Amino acid sequence: MAGEAQPDCLFCKIVSGDVPATIVRETDSTVAFRDINPQAPTHVLVIPKVHYPDAATLAAAEPQVLADVLRETGEVAGAEEIDGTGYRVVFNTGAGAGQTVFHAHAHVLGGRGMQWPPG
Ligand code: 5GP
Ligand code: ZN
């Protein structure tokens, strides 16, 4: 069935609790946890509990859950107090763009200045 947990997926294992993570927020449809290799003073990943390989695939299959993920990026930014200065939400999509975990996730990055265009 579309969206079901994949046994070899790291983020499905974080959802199930089989792999530990520093969880900062959780809802019925999402989990937010600190990135293990932070690229900014605040670097939190927001993931859907359902498994889809990237954000666009999630959007096509379960648009409400993608909306939940985006709403949670804002909740994380507020809780981390980076909403005042600004923050970046990134969905790396495809290996060529730096995606390494093929379970949809939003990076929430803040607490330092940001360059544009990104590297
Ligand atoms: P991607 O490169 O796919 O856009 O993002 C995957 C992110 O997951 C990376 O920023 C990486 O540091 C993070 N990551 C990889 N393995 C783990 C882990 O076991 N725990 C946590 N909390 N983050 C991880
Ligand atoms: Zn997964």
Image (cartoon, rainbow, N blue to C red):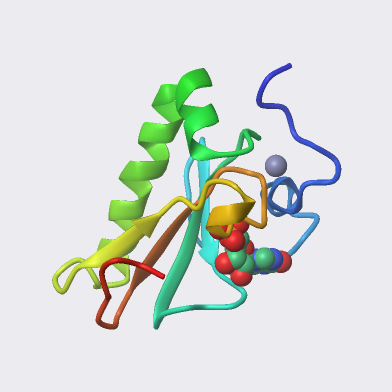
Q: What is the residue that sits farthest to the top in this orientation?
A: 1
Residue at 64%, 44% in the rendered image: 103
111 on left or right of 45: left
- Residue 42: x percent and y percent? 39, 76
Q: Quadrant of residue 117?
A: bottom left
- Quadrant housing the C terminus: bottom left
**Residue 57 placement (x, y as % from top left):** 54, 28
Q: How many numbered marks appear?
A: 0
Residue 21 shows in this picture: no
Q: Please give the name of the residue rendered at 54% of the width and 63% of the height, measured from the top-left corner.
A: 33
- Please tell me which residue is depicted at 62% across the width and 33% down the height of the picture: 52
Residue lying furthest right: 7
The answer to whether one can see residue 77 in this image is yes
- Residue 114 in percent (x, y) is at 27, 76
* Residue drawn at x 56%, y 39% as measured from the top left: 54
Q: Is residue 112 left or right of residue 14?
A: left
User: Is residue 52 rendered to the left or right of residue 76?
Assistant: right
Image quadrant where one finds the N terminus: top right
In the displayed structure, 4 sits above or below 22; it is above
Q: Locate residue 95, reporting x and y percent.
A: 63, 52
Nearer to me, 104 or 75: 104
For ligand 2, the image quadrant comes to top right
Near-viewer residue (12 or 86)? 86
